[in-house]
Image: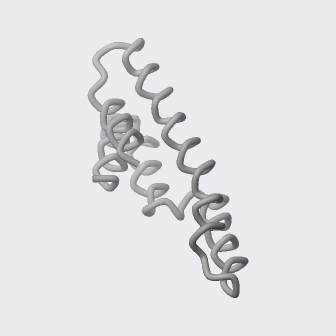
Amino acid sequence: MGVWTVAVLGCSVAPTFPLLLLCRAAVGVGEASFVSLAAPFIDDYAPAAAKARWFAVFYLCCGTGAGKMGGWLPGVAPAGCGAWRVAHAGVGQMGV
């Protein structure tokens, strides 16, 4: 989560395209790490009777995109107006 947060905040202040590209790649690494490690964590720590429910909630939230701290609205609204730096800063601050 820390890698993702720093990378998203880095996107909001990147002064050049290569730095923005590097930060966006780090965002992808952070998201992929979280999603790939969450399933084994749930499998190890969820009670047997509730394991299916835990998996259902996790994958439902991943599929909607809005499940990650409500990141859809604060990210899309400013970006639609051309303020993509504000969108990255708003979503990144929620990770802190």
Residue at 55% over, 43% down: 33
Does residue 8 lie above or below 95 as drawn?
above
**Quarter-of-image position of residue 59:** bottom right
Q: Nearer the viewer, residue 78 or 87?
A: 87
Query: Going by the image, does 28 lie left or right of 78?
Result: right
Does residue 81 lie above or below 21 as drawn?
below
Query: Going by the image, does 56 lie left or right of 15?
Result: right
Q: Nearer the viewer, residue 74 or 38?
A: 38
Residue at 36% over, 30% down: 11
Q: Position of residue 80 (x, y in %)?
A: 46, 43
The scheme the figure's colours follow is one colour
Q: Position of residue 37 (x, y in %)?
A: 58, 51
Query: Going by the image, does 63 lie left or right of 30?
Result: right
How many numbered markers are drawn? 0
Q: Residue at the front extreme?
A: 44
Q: Nearer the viewer, residue 20 or 96?
A: 96
Does residue 71 lie above or below 6 as drawn?
below
Q: Nearer the viewer, residue 76 or 19?
A: 19
Residue at 61% over, 67% down: 44
Does residue 82 lie above or below 34 as drawn?
above
Residue at 39% over, 54% down: 74
Q: Position of residue 53 (x, y in %)?
A: 68, 80
Q: Residue at the right extreme?
A: 52
